[in-house]
C-alpha cells in the first residue's frame, strides 16, 4: 500500500518538477493549508509516540522476551506504525513541495504568455 501511495506522490512531484503540471495559487491555497495541517499533526504524532527507550516487559523467560521484542518491532520496526507515520510525513512533505512547484509553474507560464502577448500586440 505504501508503494502505491508513494508512487502516486512521486509521479505528481516528478510531473511538477518537469513543468508538466501547473495550478493557480488561489486554487491551491486550500490544499496547501490542509497539507500544512496534516504535516503538523504527523509531526505531533511522531514526537508524542516515542516509547522513551522503555522496553515492553512481558516476563524474564525466553517467550516473554521474544514477545516483547516482537511487540516493539510492530511498534517501531520496518513495517510498523511508526514506519507508516514516517513514510506518510515524507510523502506529505513531497506533495507540498510539488504543489508549490505547480504554483511556480503557473506563474512562470502566465508571465511567459503575458510577455509573448505584449510582444505581439505592442
Image (cartoon, rainbow, N blue to C red):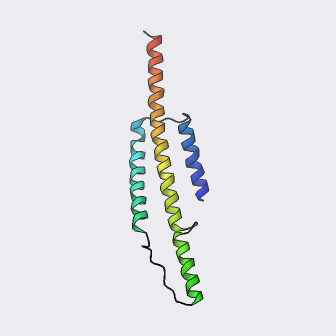
**Is 19 situated above or below 121?**
below
- Residue 26: x percent and y percent? 39, 37
Left or right of 122, for residue 2: right
Q: Residue at x 55, y 68 (%)?
A: 80
Q: Nearer the viewer, residue 111 or 72?
A: 72
Q: Is residue 116 above or below residue 105?
A: above
Residue 104, by quadrant, is top left
Between 49 and 115, the one lying in front of the other is 49
Where residue 74 sits, quadrant-wise, is bottom right
Query: Quarter of the image containing the C terminus?
Result: top left
**Number of disc labels:** 0
Instruction: Return the x and y of residue 6 as percentages of the image width and height.
Output: 57, 52
Indicate whether 17 appears above or below 47: above
Going 55% across and 69% down the picture, which residue do you hit? 77
Q: Residue 1: x, y in percent?
A: 60, 59
Question: Looking at the image, which residue is at 49% across and 62% down?
Answer: 85
Name the spot of residue 13 as percent of width and height, x first: 54, 43
The relative height of residue 60 versus residue 10 in the rendered view (above or below) is below
- Look at 39% across and 62% down and name the residue there: 44
Amino acid at each position: 500500500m505504501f508503494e502505491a501511495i508513494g508512487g502516486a506522490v512521486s509521479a505528481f512531484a516528478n510531473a511538477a518538477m518537469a513543468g508538466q503540471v501547473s495550478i493557480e495559487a488561489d486554487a491551491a491555497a486550500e490544499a496547501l493549508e490542509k497539507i500544512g495541517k496534516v504535516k503538523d499533526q504527523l509531526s505531533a504524532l511522531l514526537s508524542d509516540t516515542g516509547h522513551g527507550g522503555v522496553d515492553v516487559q512481558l516476563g524474564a523467560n525466553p517467550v516473554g522476551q521474544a514477545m516483547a521484542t516482537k511487540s516493539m518491532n510492530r511498534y517501531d520496526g520496518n513495517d510498523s506504525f511508526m514506519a507508516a507515520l514516517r513514510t506518510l510525513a515524507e510523502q506529505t512533505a513531497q506533495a507540498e513541495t510539488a504543489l508549490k512547484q505547480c504554483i511556480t509553474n503557473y506563474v512562470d507560464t502566465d508571465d511567459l504568455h503575458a510577455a509573448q502577448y505584449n510582444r505581439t500586440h505592442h
